[in-house]
Image (cartoon, grey):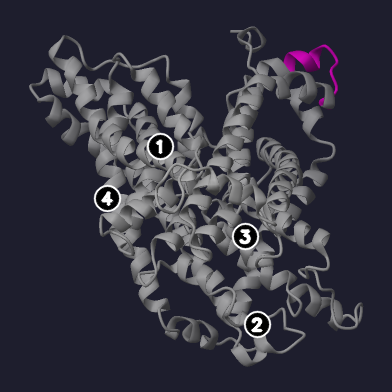
């Protein structure tokens, strides 16, 4: 009672200001997204004019269509999807067992492995991308999608391991032990009990991996010449492309992020701790 | 960009000590190593080895003979000094602002506002936005015939708009890139700090309040010290990523605002000199490692302070 009253007294005044602050921050985040969406759906003739309208007076897919019809763009979207899928599969196949091991086993070297995984974050992409590009030339992998997917997997794998570990930690170990007592093999306990329970979390982790790959540009642009991913395509043509092309490219790059974050918003919070009440 | 989406979840660290053992007995002891082997092997080949190779590349000439030519070429490059200055200055401007904003956002979410869930979703959106996309978004706003100038001219506040992104306005160019980074990369700091705030026991603040501490005193002497581990993680991650700033600068400024990662890219892509690009990559790496050590020292988390 007493603490409740205290809390009341503490939170009552200045509440109003908190909402103003929260709405101001929301606007700071939303307005640029609104602007790029308006730009992407304003016809090119209007976009080339000045001043540009801030409300979509004439909505048209003209700008987006022209962007997608530009030589190389359509293929780069497909390439990005393929690279994303390859990265996702490779990091899950390699990372899930390691995450499970971290979550379920006490073994010598566990702490060192975890430290190693955390350390990988301190290394810039450039340090991987430059030598791997040189290597991929000698291996005949230069300008291929698997080469890009390998670099993306190297970037994503440490995170996949940590995220899957935290997902398996949240799956009660008792259930697996029960399965073992009832005659399941360890592998059976994993595939029949732990996996299904961890599946939604793993799906969320996969989406993270995909978005990481979809967004990565440094490695993609130096590893490829003709087999560009979408960000590499947009970056390489930034210097000599008209504004409507760039705006449409910006919107195309953001779109998956909006959709994916919406679908995994629940897991976003699960992954980093409890949700705000 | 990249790793930013998914920082090491502090949840995983909390559980470090409590490794629930399924494996017992000697036969089981092989299992965890077998499970780790594929990822360790992959990281050795595609993470550790490239780093060694970068080191080798940086001290070889184009024919593969040992030489300091790449390093000399980097240091003597006309844009080298500016690239270092801009990269450090960029981190120095963006990171403090970002940390304060993220802290405010996290505290707002903890304040029990109505619709906190919706705010959290909105504020998390930039987690999925790349630095290239962010650069293009803010380009549409700041470019000469962009949306801010459209407003200024429509309202009659300016004759033909302000050239925010002109190389003649290096300060405004720099600030535009900083705003784009602030917009894109504050979410990750917020998420890390928010998860740190959530594990702070409520009793401490309430106890301080009983003894008459003001809201500011509670924040300064209770919340902030307890938040130190999360701040450490967030600052290290953000600094490492700030040293890699790249596409946002290219999208907004072209080559007008040299930074280290952009110089590495230009040397590889335009000048076709992988050796000098590797030297730049190494420089970024040493800077990142150096600052990580500094943060670990400065923000050392003493167990006694945590009351554990």
**CA–CA distance between discs 1 and 2?**
53 Å
Residue A61, position as x, y percentages in the image: 51, 85
Mark 4 Cα shell of 10 Å, populated few (<14), some (14-19), many (≥20): some
**CA–CA distance between discs 2 and 3?**
26 Å
Question: Tags 1 and 4 in contact by the CB under 8 Å rule?
Answer: no
- Name the one closer to the observer, B94 or A269: B94
Q: Which residue is mark 1?
A: B52
**Chain part drawn in magenta:** B206-215
Q: Which residue is mark 3?
A: B248
Q: Which residue is mark 2?
A: A56
Q: Earlier in the sequence, mark 2 or mark 4?
A: 2
Q: Nearer the viewer, mark 3 or mark 4?
A: 3
SS at badge 1: helix
SS at badge 3: helix
Which residue occupies the extreme bottom position in the image? A45
Q: Which residue is mark 4?
A: A89
Do badges 1 and 2 share one subunit?
no
Question: Tags 1 and 3 in contact by the CB under 8 Å rule?
Answer: no
How many numbered dots are placed on residues in this image? 4
């Amino acid at each position: 009672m007493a603490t409740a009253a205290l809390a009341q007294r503490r939170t009552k005044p200045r509440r109003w200001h908190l909402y103003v602050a929260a709405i101001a921050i929301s606007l700071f985040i939303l307005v640029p997204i609104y602007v790029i969406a308006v730009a992407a759906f304003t016809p090119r003739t209007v976009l080339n004019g000045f001043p540009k309208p801030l409300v979509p007076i004439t909505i048209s897919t003209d700008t987006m269509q022209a962007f997608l019809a530009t030589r190389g763009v359509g293929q780069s979207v497909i390439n990005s999807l393929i690279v994303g899928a390859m990265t996702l599969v490779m990091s899950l196949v390699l990372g899930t067992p390691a995450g499970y091991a971290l979550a379920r086993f006490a073994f010598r070297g566990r702490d060192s492995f975890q430290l190693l995984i955390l350390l990988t974050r301190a290394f810039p992409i450039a340090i991987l991308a430059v030598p791997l590009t040189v290597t991929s030339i000698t291996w005949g992998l230069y300008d291929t999608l698997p080469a890009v997917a390998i670099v993306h997997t190297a970037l994503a794998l440490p995170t996949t391991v940590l995220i899957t570990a935290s997902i398996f930690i949240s799956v009660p170990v008792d259930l697996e032990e029960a399965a073992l007592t009832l005659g399941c093999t360890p592998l059976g306990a994993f595939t029949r009990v732990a996996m299904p329970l961890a599946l939604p979390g793993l799906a969320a982790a996969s989406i993270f991996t995909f978005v990481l790959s979809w967004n990565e540009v440094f490695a993609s642009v130096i590893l490829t010449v003709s087999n560009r991913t979408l960000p590499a395509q947009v970056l390489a043509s930034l210097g000599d492309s008209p504004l409507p092309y760039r705006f449409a490219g910006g919107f195309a790059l953001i779109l998956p992020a909006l959709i994916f974050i919406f679908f995994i918003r629940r897991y976003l919070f699960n992954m980093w701790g409890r949700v705000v009440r | 960009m990249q790793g930013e989406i998914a920082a090491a979840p502090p949840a995983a660290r909390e559980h470090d000590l409590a490794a629930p053992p399924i494996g017992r007995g000697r036969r089981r002891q092989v299992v965890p190593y077998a499970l780790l082997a594929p990822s360790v092997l992959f990281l050795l080949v595609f993470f550790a080895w490239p780093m060694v190779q970068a080191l080798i590349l940086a001290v070889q000439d184009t024919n593969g003979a040992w030489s300091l030519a790449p390093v000399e070429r980097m240091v003597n490059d006309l844009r080298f000094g500016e690239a270092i200055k801009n990269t450090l200055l960029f981190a120095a401007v963006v990171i403090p602002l970002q940390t304060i904003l993220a802290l405010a956002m996290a505290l707002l979410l903890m304040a029990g506002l109505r619709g906190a869930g919706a705010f959290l979703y909105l504020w998390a959106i930039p987690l999925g936005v790349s630095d290239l996309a962010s650069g293009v978004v803010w380009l549409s706003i700041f470019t000469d015939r962009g949306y801010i100038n459209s407003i200024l001219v429509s309202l009659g506040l300016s004759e033909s708009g302000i050239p925010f992104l002109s190389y003649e306005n290096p300060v405004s160019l720099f600030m535009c890139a900083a705003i784009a980074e602030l917009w894109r990369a504050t979410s990750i700091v917020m998420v890390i700090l928010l998860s740190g705030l959530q594990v702070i026991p409520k009793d401490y603040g309430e106890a301080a309040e009983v003894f008459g501490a003001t809201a500011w005193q509670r924040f300064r002497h209770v919340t902030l010290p307890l938040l130190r581990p999360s701040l450490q993680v967030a600052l290290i991650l953000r600094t490492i990523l700030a040293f890699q700033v790249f596409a946002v600068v290219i999208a907004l400024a072209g080559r007008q605002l040299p930074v280290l990662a952009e110089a590495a890219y230009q040397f590889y892509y335009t000048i076709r000199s992988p050796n000098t690009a590797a030297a730049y990559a190494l420089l970024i790496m040493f800077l990142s490692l150096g600052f990580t050590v500094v943060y670990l020292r400065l923000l050392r988390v003493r167990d006694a302070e945590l009351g554990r």
